[in-house]
Image (tube, rainbow, N blue to C red):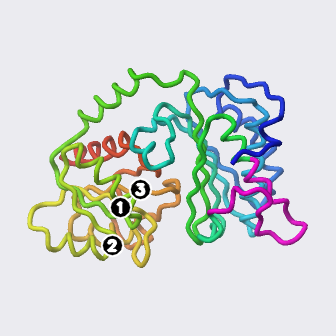
Amino acid sequence: MDLAFARDQKISPRVLSLSTYAERMKPMLTRIVGEDVEIELDLAQPLGDVLIDPGHVEQILLNLAANARDAMPRGGRLTIHTANIFLDKEYERLHNGVPPGRYVMLTVSDTGDGIPEAVKPHIFEPFFTTKALHRGTGLGLATVHGLVMQNRGHIWVYSEPGMGATFKIYLPHVEGTSTDVEATHDKEKDELGGTETILLVEDDDGVRQSLRRALQRGGYTVLEARNAGEALLIFEQHETPIHAMITDVIMPRMTGPELAARLRKVRPDLCIVFISGYSEDRVPEAHATGTPTPLHDAFIAKPVSVDALLRGVRGVLDGKS
């Protein structure tokens, strides 16, 4: 879906840094969200360049900020994060053919009430709105979607009730993608494998299967659990050592941090990796679960690339070996 009014505007693309523009726009965004909302910038330096009309960057950030403001009527925090990222073939398979390669990620997160599950499929539709009459046009997120698509990008939304919403935008790095880049990443993945046993806890079947395949290709033995209850049962009954656990943060009944706290008490040396669509600062601290030691050794943001997964797992295993 691409909005006609976004597509037909005269544009003047430039090579620019999203970190630079986000920093420049902070005063304007502060006026948009109001004094009850704190704006936090977490901007990568150096950040890869993208080719985009500066006006499109402004429209994207302004619309996402306005959407976040409306989601936080009692105040809260708006976080803007940028990062360099490589999207691999596994991501392409799971996300409607997004071409593999180097991208620049722009993440905008809020601490509002989150997006109801029934609403998520419609949020980018023109004129769709959950606001009261005369409070919104329903074009803000549709405009963002149209601009991202126009610039050969991809947008992904992560939200759980009561946990706010996170919008992740991927725009192609201007240097493009080559077979050399892909081959380099494939070689690095081969070097990041191992033979240890990993307990993988994820309630989304598609995500869990994708992560399992990536870990198995890296040589790891993978034990799968759909929730924390299954994970605890596997941990108690498995006869050989489990070297690491990878767990989603938000899960029904028992969360990833709660599961980690339980296991830390019996296996303080267990390597634990959290994965989540939210930023790491939304993960509960150890003291919140009554655990004296840190709950996790590494954090990987969703959507998880094979490269980030293998690097994260190998890093924590080597760090505790």
55 vs 138: above or below:
above
Say if residue 233 shows up in the picture.
yes
Helix, strand or loop status at disc 1: strand
Helix, strand or loop status at disc 2: helix
The amino acid type of the residue labelled 3 equals Ile
- Dot 1, crowdedness within 10 Å: few (<14), some or many (≥20)? many
Magenta stretch containing residue 112, yes or no?
A: no
Which dot marks residue 228?
Answer: 2
For the residues bearing labels 2 and 1, Cβ distance under 8 angstroms: yes
Res. 310 image quadrant: top left
Question: What's drawn in magenta, residue-wise?
Answer: 121-143
Furthest toward the bottom, the residue is: 253
Residue drawn at x 36%, y 39% is 307
Q: Which residue is mark 1?
A: 247
Image coordinates of residue 167 in percent, x first then y, are 61, 52
Image coordinates of residue 4 in percent, x first then y, are 80, 43
Quick one: label 3 or label 1, which is nearer the N terminus?
1
230 vs 122: above or below:
below
Say if residue 42 shows up in the picture.
no
Residue drawn at x 78%, y 49% is 30
Residue drawn at x 17%, y 46% is 321
For the residues bearing labels 3 and 1, Cβ distance under 8 angstroms: yes
Q: Which residue is mark 3?
A: 275
